Image: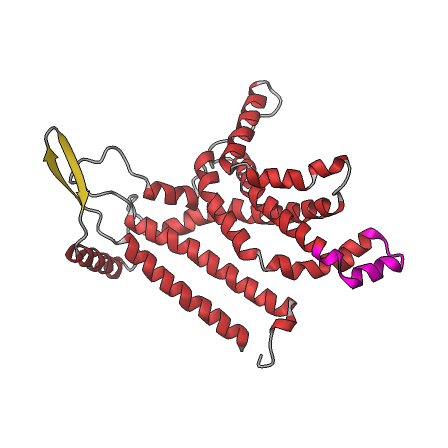
Amino acid sequence: MKLLWKLVGSLLLWVTVAAVLVLLVLLPRDTQSHRDGYKDIMSYKFTWTAYKENIVNYWEGVKEHKSLGITRYELPVEEELVHFGWRSAKILIPALFLSVLAGVYKGMFDYRRQTGLWRFFGKRMTWLGQAVPEFILIIFIQTIVFEAGKRGFLEIDIYGDEKLENLFLPILFLSMYPAAIIARYTAAALEEEDSQDYIKTARSKGIGEKAVLWHHAMRNSWPKLLQQSMPIFMTLLSGMFIVEFMSIYNGIGYRLVVALQLKGVISPGQSLPIETPAVIGFSLLFMALLLIVQWIVAILEYVLVPVKRGDGS
């Protein structure tokens, strides 16, 4: 019962945040202007009348088209969500598995290699992976691949989304930063377990270090890593904007950036243009993904950490 209330609470919170997001997007964006000597001065003035008109017009459009809206391509938002969502899933899902796999193994390496020359490739390298901005790493790797291709060593199409090879670099880019975060969490969880009595007992019995690591320390570290799932997944989703935009990979991240992008020069008195239906639709999709992950994490925590269930469950 406690799990059910937690899931329902998450849903209610999602509905509330979704409503606030839609109302924010529908804020009036009309500008005003006046002449001051030789300059055109732009200003913004909020009016409830314009705001109410935006809400009413949008709601009437939703009822008329039975859709969240019609995009600039004269397509229902839902159709674009399926098209671009599937394209992004082809890099998001592999990147999620790659970041977890690489992050856990890197965290175990950091835990085991804290002395000697190997320590440089341990926590210091993990720290470097988190410290360097993501876009700099992307530009660095793209430059290396581009130069290698010019010299005949490695030819990969680093931009676009039409070829199978266009998936490789976006998957790598998207998984790098979350992998570094998972590695840090894994190493910290293992170090915390290392001081526990059951680890000392296992070692005193002559059990091998690998067995202690996998069958004892790592098994008890999974619940701690699970608690960090939401910030890790949020990092993964936020990285999609940068990765897709810099790779010109036309998925939901790139499409939302395009929907928010200001085109050309805004003349005084013009409305600040965004593609309202697309912004609402794709933003709600991102929020829905976060809600699903939150539900999955809550269920897994309930199953894997029974001490938290309570007497009334």
The answer to which quarter of the image holds residue 309 is: bottom right
Colour scheme shown: secondary structure
Residue 259 pos. (x, y %): 33, 43
Asked whether, in this view, residue 247 is left or right of residue 255, the answer is right
Q: Is residue 187 visible?
A: yes
The answer to which quarter of the image holds residue 102 is: top right
Residue 23 pos. (x, y %): 28, 58
Asked whether, in this view, residue 88 is left or right of residue 299, the answer is left
Residue name at image x 48 percent, y 39 percent: 243
Vertical position of residue 43 compared to residue 139: above or below:
below
Residue name at image x 10 percent, y 35 percent: 35
Q: Residue furthest top?
A: 151
Residue 218 pos. (x, y %): 72, 56
Q: For the magenta stretch, what is the residue range?
A: 192-209
Q: Is residue 157 visible?
A: no
Q: Residue furthest bottom?
A: 312
